[in-house]
Image (cartoon, coloured by chain):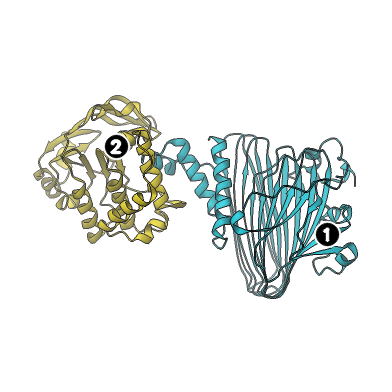
Amino acid sequence: MFDVKDLQVTVGGTEIIKGLTLSVPAGETHAIMGPNGSGKSTLAYALSGRDGYEVTGGAAMLAGTDLLALAPEERAAAGLFLSFQYPVEIPGLSAIAFLKAALNAQRKARGLEPMPAPELLKLLRAKAEALKIDQEMLKRPLNVGFSGGEKKRFEALQLAVLEPKFAILDETDSGLDIDALKIVAASVNAARAPDRALLVITHYQRLLDYIKPDRVHVLAKGRIIASGGPELALELEREGYDKYLRAA
Amino acid sequence: MNLADLPNRRNEAWKYSDLRAAVGDALPPLAQAPANAPAAGKLFASLKPIEIVFENGRIAHWPERNVRKASRVLSKQYPGEPRGATPLGAWAAELSPDEWMPIIEAGEDERPVWVRMVGDTSPTSGHARVGLVVGAGRTLNLIETYEGPAVGFTNVLIEGFVAEGATLNRTVIQDASEKAALVSTAQIKLERNGHLSQYVLALGAKLARIETHVNAEGDGAMVTLNGAYLSGAGRHADLTSVIEHKAPGGATRQLIKGVARKGGRGVFQGKIVVERAAQKTDARQHHQGLLLEDGAEIFAKPELMIHADDVQCAHGNTAGGLDERALFYMRSRGIPEAEARALLIEAFLAETIPNGLPEALRDELTGLIRTWLAGARL
């Protein structure tokens, strides 16, 4: 479903991703772990098409679509979703208006009519309730004054509403207490589907107690330097990244 | 009055807005009284407003209800500010050729009064004057629009008197043509616990200045003076205000935001004066400008002059571009770039619309912002 081959990414003239190859088949959840500065967030931004993250080589395909040729909004319409480590606050724009704009823009890109307002509200209510998100929060300006946990839950709500083919969850666990972490992890688990692939990016093994990955990859110095089953995450937790950093 | 009398950038209060240059080579002749009754306005239908219409500054239509017809003699008894706080305001009072000035008095009926200043394509000078009287404990809901394909010079003076415990809600929509030169000066006096809540949406003109002077003379006078300007190519929108707190326990809340495109200019000048007697004044003023393209201009001059020692005052002023992180966040959710820009700008500007406005009025204002953004194709 999602295939990256020999990806190279430069930020501000410095090469950060140096030939990264990764495959996540439909129905699977993979985790990328790595120390700070290994290029985890750079990978997420480059795949989403953020300005300033220049892809200098390689390929990234999602269900047969060449992502790298597309603008960020076209990548989203093609089925890509990035859950942000630091969701952006937008004063003056309600969370509900934002979700409506996003959902209908994606529908339009796929040749569908906008979702009628009552149907949309019903959908949002149901999905919000499942994530224990207060309905009042939907009326508030997007992410403004949301706690760390609320922001991440709202990212999870967007994932649930937009139903992407492939989602990258960048440090979804950062800034969460254990209760919020369980809720967010449950939402990620609920998003697992036979026709969907997930990529969880994390620094710590803690999140993987709640989201069981099919495969774990170690990212260091801009490359995947080791891959394995869920036991790899436990080993990293026990022994740290040193062994891999020395070998890389 | 001659062209040479008009202020230009050598006058400190007009250094960003050169009225003389905008009016042109010669002052156009005074407008004649309108021949035909004007067509009814199309906005705010659900609010059932009482309409008063001026054409090129001349009275064209007034209703009988709630509006007192005053002669010039009566107007001298008018309890507002002494006229002439600004030279332009004084000229509007002196040069208005109509025999009488409408005075809008708040009554039992709280339907909004809609003052329409309509300009047509005749190159004329128009001077108009309107009085507002809000008696003790009453509320006046006023909507003012500046509209039509005007090409000349329009100069308006609004004199308002807000008595004890009374409220004036004033909403101004400045939507004149790109060939018009327009100055509207309001002088509003607030007595004890008087309340002015003002909102201005300015779309600019060749030059359009909405100037507000508030004399907060009574104890506990409350002022909300928000606004937004949207200045496209070839347009100049100026929001200028002077708020004077002269008695204890008053408050001001002022949030002004604006956007300018290439070739457009936005101006905000906001002065708040807290006199020695005005202890416990709480004044907040914020201006944020958004430069949408290279070649856009925004000039801001916030001023706080505090002569009392036990007050809370704060002001802030910023100008910059659109938040690129927010733009990327929205695009990553599938919202195309142009739509994301428009939504962000709308969100930025919508914050200035006071919460207390009637839903229908909020919707009209938001609709005008949306129409502008759709036409701007950013």
Q: Secondary structure at mark 1?
A: strand
Q: CA distance from mark 1 to mark 2?
A: 64 Å
Point out residue A114 in the picture as x, y percentages from the top left corner: 38, 41
In the image, taking residue B163 as reference, residue A3 lies left or right, namely: left
**Image mark for residue A80:** 2
Point out residue A187 in the picture as x, y percentages from the top left corner: 23, 52
Drawing shade for chain B: cyan
In the image, taking residue B290 as reference, residue A32 lies left or right, namely: left
Compare residues A207 and B353 and report the one nearer the observer: B353
In the image, taking residue B378 as reference, residue B71 lies left or right, namely: right
What residue sits right under mark 1 in the picture? B101
Circles 1, 2 touching at the beta carbon (< 8 Å): no
Report the residue at 31% width, 59% height from top.
Answer: A133
Report the residue at 25% width, 52% height from top.
Answer: A173
In the rendered view of the protein, which quadrant contains the N terminus of chain A?
top left
Point out residue A241 in the picture as x, y percentages from the top left corner: 17, 43
Point out residue A203 in the picture as x, y percentages from the top left corner: 23, 47
